[in-house]
Image: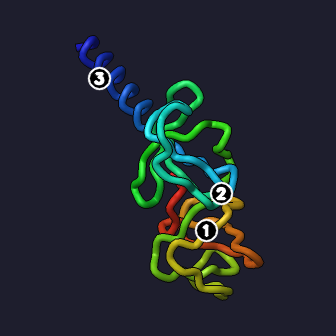
Amino acid sequence: MFKIILIFFFLLSAFQSLAAEEYFLTLRNDKVNLRQGPSFEYPIKLFYKKKFLPVLVQDKYDNFRKIRDHENNTGWIHISQLSKRKAALIIDDEQLIFNKPSIYSKPSVVLKKGRLCKIKKCNKNWCKVNVENYKGWVKKESLWGLL
């Protein structure tokens, strides 16, 4: 019986470590190459032209990271082109920025789908964001780029 419990906990911890391997980073530069494989020898699939665009890191090989973007494009990017700065994209058609983390506080601006937001901090349900000259709180469920 003890061996079965021990095996169960071992498998549970293995699955949790696999799930924890995916994480978000952002693009460091205004021009970043997405490659078909984990080397400079592989051809370029597409170019990203948006600094701080969030990408989901799914795998790694040497100094390259396999990523997936918000449009489900996948490929490999050199680690030097990635940053730990936090940013996210609005995924709802329209999303309000509030002055405080509550739907009952005063809204300050409406964000359209696809708008890039720099993340300052997050709590359980809300994130404080900067979008150009605007600052405020956005519902976490409306953002792509956070776990």
Q: Amino acid at mark 3?
A: Phe
* 144 shown above or below 139: above
Q: Which mark is residue 8?
A: 3
**Position of 51 compared to 111: left or right?**
right
Return the residue nearer the eye: 76 or 40. 40
Sequence-first disc among 3 and 1: 3
- Point out the image quarter for the N terminus: top left
Sequence-first disc among 2 and 3: 3
Q: Position of residue 29 (x, y in %)?
A: 69, 52
Which mark's residue is nearer the viewer, 3 or 1?
A: 1
Please say whether residue 24 is visible from this viewpoint. yes
Return the residue nearer the eye: 63 or 96. 63
Return the residue nearer the eye: 82 or 141. 82
Q: Residue farthest to the top?
A: 3
* 66 shown above or below 112: above
Number of numbered callouts drawn = 3
Q: Report the residue marked by disc 2.
A: 52
Residue at x 69%, y 75% (from the top left corner)? 136
Residue at x 60%, y 77% (from the top left corner)? 102
Which mark's residue is nearer the viewer, 2 or 3?
A: 2
**Mark 3, secondary structure of its residue:** helix
Q: Position of residue 19 (x, y in %)?
A: 41, 37
Q: Distance between the Cα atoms at labels 3 and 1? A: 42 Å
Sequence-first disc among 1 and 2: 2
Q: Amino acid at mark 2?
A: Phe
Q: Report the residue marked by disc 1.
A: 116
Q: Amino acid at mark 1?
A: Leu
